[in-house]
């Protein structure tokens, strides 16, 4: 279909207003578990909203590097398969060690200025959740596959008719 997907690290607290440490329950939890089951992906859902900012700071620092995809995979595995809290002091450094990333190559894990700027740009672009897809307008959340395909096809058809 000619659709390109780009992952960007964002501070979801800045997008959604959900507070770090808040219990993840109700529709948020149920939707994540439903999608995981539909995709046949084992998922350990954190009990609380984790502080992912240091991990995202590293992701921004690794953007465009050979380590970018490996970092995303390592963080995903740590949180959703191993049940680790990436907001605990020293955890991001341990994940970097798992990938043999030298500590000297890591950005300052407490400098959130770049992450804040990316998050603000996303908010200005009307990103409302994760994932958000742009099909001529922001489409937030995971929709049924047929709905996603229909919306992408409509966007592609509209672009072709211009």
Image (cartoon, helix red, strand yellow):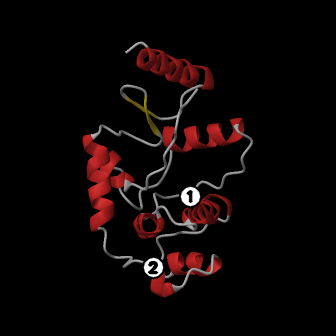
User: Which residue is tagged 1?
Assistant: 46
Mark 1 secondary-structure assignment: loop
Question: Residue 60: horizontal and vertical position, in percent?
Answer: 42, 64
Hey, which quadrant is residue 145 in on the image?
top right
Hey, which quadrant is residue 94 in on the image?
bottom right
Q: Residue at 42% of width from left, 69% of height from top? A: 61
User: Compared to 132, does 148 lie above or below?
Assistant: above
Residue 46 shows in this picture = yes
Q: Residue at 60% of width from left, 81% of height from top? A: 97
User: How many numbered discs sit on the rendered protein?
Assistant: 2
State the CA–CA distance, disc 2 to disc 1.
25 Å
Question: Residue 87: horizontal and vertical position, in percent?
Answer: 46, 70
Q: Residues within 10 Å of mark 2 (few under 14, many from 20)?
A: some
Residue 26 shows in this picture = no
Hey, which quadrant is residue 54 in on the image?
bottom left
Mark 2 secondary-structure assignment: loop
User: Which residue is tagged 2?
Assistant: 106
Look at the image and tell me in which quarter the N terminus lies: top right
In the image, taking residue 137 as reference, residue 73 lies left or right, namely right
């Amino acid at each position: 279909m000619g659709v390109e997907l780009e992952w960007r690290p964002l501070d979801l607290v800045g997008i959604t207003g959900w507070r770090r440490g808040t219990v993840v329950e109700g529709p948020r939890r149920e939707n994540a578990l439903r999608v995981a089951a539909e995709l046949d992906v084992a998922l350990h859902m954190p009990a609380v909203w984790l502080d992912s900012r240091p991990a995202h700071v590293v992701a921004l620092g690794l953007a465009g590097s050979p380590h970018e995809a490996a970092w995303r995979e390592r963080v995903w595995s740590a949180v959703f398969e191993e049940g680790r809290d990436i907001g605990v002091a020293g955890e991001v450094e341990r994940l970097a060690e798992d990938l043999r990333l030298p500590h000297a190559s890591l950005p300052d894990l407490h400098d959130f200025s770049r992450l804040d700027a990316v998050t603000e740009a996303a908010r200005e672009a009307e990103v409302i959740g994760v994932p958000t897809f742009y099909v001529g307008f922001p489409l937030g959340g995971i929709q049924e596959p047929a709905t996603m395909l229909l919306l992408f096809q409509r966007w592609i058809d509209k672009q072709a008719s211009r």
